[in-house]
Image: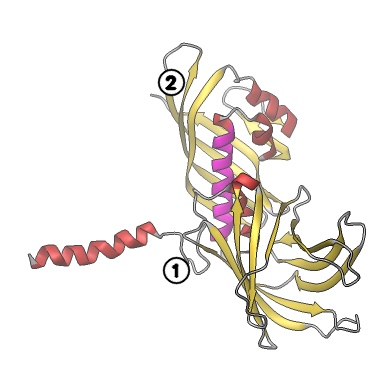
Amino acid sequence: MKTIAGIFLVIFPLLLNAQYSYEPSAAHPFGLPNPDAPKELMDFAPLIGECNCKSVTRKPDQTWAEPVDMVWRFKYIMNGLAIQDETLKKDNTYAGSIRQFIPDSTRWYVHYYSSGFPTTVLPAWEGRKTKEGKIVLYREQKAPNGMDGYYRLTFYDINNKGFQWAGEWVDKTESVVFPTWKIDCSNGKIASSNQAEEDAIRVASKAFSIAYVQQDFDSMARLYTEDAKLMPLGVPIVEGREAIKSRWEMGRETRILNHSMDAEEIQIVGDYAYDYGYYQGSSQKGNEPVAHWKGKYVVVWKKVGAEWKMYIDIWNRLKD
């Protein structure tokens, strides 16, 4: 009986750890993204970690105050389904937010809190990532003169070294812009991990598989760089995003029932990475029997802005 109890005491914590394997831990201090999270979770992947930043706000007389040093920390929470960030300023003011993407509304919702202004109801911003790679969030707010508008938050110039952030009042047409807060984290990355980049690549691989099953050839093409190379077995190299899209469209008469790419290793070198492993799936053409297949692949990834895209894609099937 004691032996059984001892085994339970050993196994039960392991089961709990497996349940919450995407939470921050000693091995992954900023957590990990949950594969079941919306793909938009990776909008903030380049920010995961810590940055040394300079925060500047406007004074009541509308001049800019002296910059304040701060650390801005981002991490995955809720077992990798959401993101939390906190700012730790040298003037002993602290703030943070909970960031969740809600697929039904196709946007981010951000609830903000601070040590200086505790409140029973947290103010909320909402928005999304733009085609230009910015993350833009809005909250309705009147100007001092009573004009309707928004307080707009923008993350921009996001890269491996950091990012820029701006808080601005804008009118409803966004033709009037009045900045009130600026934070420069553009060269301040002090703690990060290639794990976040590896996770971004895994999410991109998953997005490719989903698009392949859905025959969403536009989404498949966007996962490649403009100058990408496709190297199918037995045919010349297919060069360029549009040519690659056309190549995948040739198989539209065959339904892809499932597909996955299982990486054996991902190595990152600057703005490039390589990923190799095995793929598998099943398909059906017309009323023919379902075909099950597997193979091996190598992908060379290239970072474009804040996103990892396929630059060279090579694969071949294994014999049954």
The residue under the point 67% across, 54% down is 271
Residue 228: image x %, image y %?
A: 70, 37
Q: Secondary structure at mark 2?
A: strand
Q: Nearer the viewer, residue 234 or 182?
A: 182
What amino acid is at disc 2? Ala
Q: Is residue 136 above or below residue 94?
A: above
Magenta run includes residue 28? no
Q: Quadrant of the N terminus?
A: bottom left
Q: Quadrant of the C terminus?
A: top left
Position of residue 278 in the picture relative to residue 235 (left or right): left
Position of residue 161 in the picture relative to residue 202 (left or right): right
Classify mark 2: residues with Cα within 10 Å, few (<14), some (14-19) or many (20+).
Answer: few
- Mark yes or no: residue 114 visible: yes
Q: Which residues are magenta?
A: 195-211
What amino acid is at disc 1? Ser
Mark identifier at residue 235: none
Q: Earlier in the sequence, mark 1 or mark 2?
A: 1
Q: Residue lying at the far bottom in this picture: please name it.
A: 91
Q: Nearer the viewer, residue 307 or 147?
A: 147
Q: Is residue 246 above or below residue 98?
A: above
Q: Main secondary structure of the magenta part?
A: helix
Residue 259: image x %, image y %?
A: 49, 33
Q: Residue lying at the far front in this picture: please name it.
A: 146
User: Residue 294 is drawn in which quadrant?
Assistant: top left
Q: Nearer the viewer, residue 123 or 259?
A: 123
Mark identifier at residue 25: 1
Magenta run includes residue 196? yes
Q: Residue lying at the far top in this picture: please name it.
A: 287
Residue to which mark 2 is pinned: 291
Residue 230: image x %, image y %?
A: 64, 32
Q: Secondary structure at mark 1?
A: loop
